[in-house]
Amino acid sequence: MNGFLTTTTLRSTALKQAMKPLKQTDLIPVLLELQFNLQHLGNRVIVAETSQYNEISCEEQEDIICNSNVTFRLESVIMNEQMYLIKISASNEGHLIQEKYIKDSHRQMEDISIRILFGRLMCDMGQWDQSQHFFENLLNNLNYYNEDLAKIERSLDEVLQWKEAQKYYDRAYNRIMNTKSIRIKDLAYILFDIGELLHLQGRYEEAREYFE
């Protein structure tokens, strides 16, 4: 999660917000129930009550706020006639994932700098344009940044390969979809390959949509 999350400790207030009538009729109300175990979270996740800072005391303003270093684990999803109830619990796994990524990257490329690691992270997240621009900037300013030219070029080559692969998959998909008689078998291969490409990037939810 990026940014700050504010929520209420009062279930009645959350239910009231979730059940508000909407103009759109194709939406389903969702109630998120967050669980925080502060002993397990340690000091990497900050959770604070905001009621003490409200000038006007109100029963419906028992709010809490948590910082951006929070990863939520899905515990359960329950559907009843009126809404979805989704239970999630806060964890510090985001920090563990971050540490693992850094260690794995260092293992793959010895003596990799923080700058190059940052550019590769953008590539792994599918942010190819940003990653390409970042590495090109390093190339154009080698004297200033004092980076390893070979590592920059290797990383930039990987970014361009991802972009080229996505471009050709998209082109093949559009060509099949624009034919008079759609070749289902060929379309299935293309969708599977796009899903596999997204899966390799760690974009699992997007990949699942293509696999389905």
Image: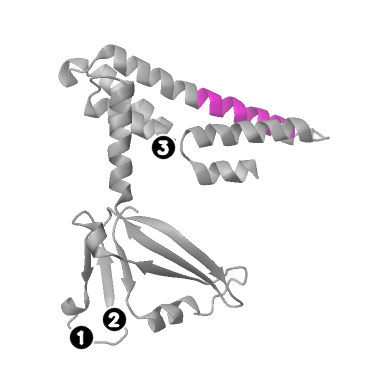
- The picture places residue 171, in percent across and down from the top left corner, at 63, 28
In which quadrant of the rendered view does residue 113 lie? Answer: top left
Assess disc 1: are there few (<14), some (14-19) or many (≥20) residues with their C-alpha within 10 Å of its C-alpha: few
- The picture places residue 14, in percent across and down from the top left corner, at 41, 77
Q: What residue type is disc 2 on?
A: Gln
148 vs 171: above or below: above
Query: Under tag 1, what secondary structure?
Result: loop
Q: Mark 2 points at which residue?
A: 61
Which circle's residue, 3 or 1, is located before the other in the chain?
A: 1
> Is 73 displayed left or right of 197 in the figure?
left
- Quadrant occupied by the N terminus: bottom left
In which quadrant of the rendered view does residue 26 lie? Answer: bottom right
C-alpha span from label 3 to label 1: 44 Å
Query: Under tag 3, what secondary structure?
Result: loop
Q: Are marks 2 and 1 in contact (CB under 8 Å)?
A: yes
- The picture places residue 72, in percent across and down from the top left corner, at 37, 57
Q: Between tags 3 and 1, which lies in front?
A: 3
Q: Name the residue under label 1.
A: 56
Which circle's residue, 3 or 2, is located before the other in the chain?
A: 2
80 vs 157: above or below: below
> Is 93 displayed left or right of 74 in the figure?
left
C-alpha span from label 3 to label 2: 37 Å
167 vs 64: above or below: above
User: Which residues fall within the magenta stretch?
Assistant: 163-176
Task: Report if residue 105 lies within the magenta region.
Answer: no
Q: Mark 3 points at which residue?
A: 125
Assess disc 3: are there few (<14), some (14-19) or many (≥20) residues with their C-alpha within 10 Å of its C-alpha: some
Q: Which residue is drawn at 33% across and 35% down?
A: 101
Magenta region, main secondary structure: helix
